[in-house]
Image: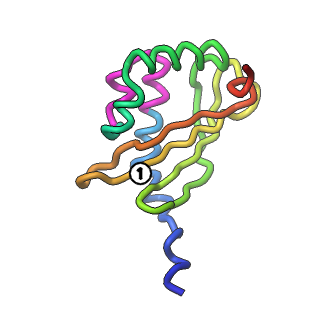
Amino acid sequence: AGCLNQNQIDTEQVRAYADPITENILVAMNEDNYTKYSEHFDATMKNVLPEPVFQENNALVTSKIGTYVSKEFWKAESENQYTIVYYKATFTQELGDVIVKVVFQEIAGETKVSGLWMDSPKLREK
């Protein structure tokens, strides 16, 4: 029976850090501000997403779905040491929801972003 509680998440507790960090990332994309964008990234994320890659990705995202407008919390999951939080975001040039998936991990007492994905019909277009 102990296994059942493993994936239980205190949504309010998660949203207390996830909402502001995710908002910060999305606003930083609008501002094309890498320092602000990567502020909460763990070391691995900073390595795989250095500033030139951010600028390239950001230009692509902006050209396809426009700029970030707002987000709505959708759900949160727990997997091993990670907490995965999903948002339905609105962008200026995407008619439907843009799903923003942010993976958080606590490292040395700090909440860090260990993964970040965005998905929408326009982003899936080649």
Rendered view: 116 above or below 68:
below
Rendered view: 45 above or below 59:
below
Query: What residue would you read off at disc 1?
Result: 16
Quadrant holding the N terminus: bottom right
* 38 left or right, relative to 101: left
Predominant SS along the magenta part = helix
Res. 120 image quadrant: top right
- In front: 80, or 91? 80
Q: How many marks?
A: 1
How many C-alpha atoms fall within 10 Å of the one at disc 1: few (<14), some, or many (≥20)?
Answer: few
Residue 28: say if magenta: yes
- Tell me where residue 117 appears, x and y as whole percent: 56, 36
Colouring = rainbow
- Helix, strand or loop at mark 1: helix
Res. 43 image quadrant: top left
Quadrant holding the C terminus: top right
- Tell me where residue 102 appears, x and y as whole percent: 50, 43
Rendered view: 85 above or below 60:
below
Q: Which residue is at a point 50% across and 60% down the rendered structure image? A: 79
Q: Which residue is at a point 44% across and 55% down the rendered structure image? A: 82
Q: Which residue is at a point 49% across and 18% down the rendered structure image? A: 30
* 112 left or right, relative to 103: left
Q: Farthest residue toward the bottom? A: 1
The three-letter amino acid code for the residue at tag 1 is Ala
Residue interval drawn in magenta: 24-40
Q: Which residue is at a point 64% across and 38% down the rendered structure image? A: 99
- Tell me where residue 94 appears, x and y as whole percent: 71, 23
- Tell me where residue 88 appears, x and y as whole percent: 64, 40
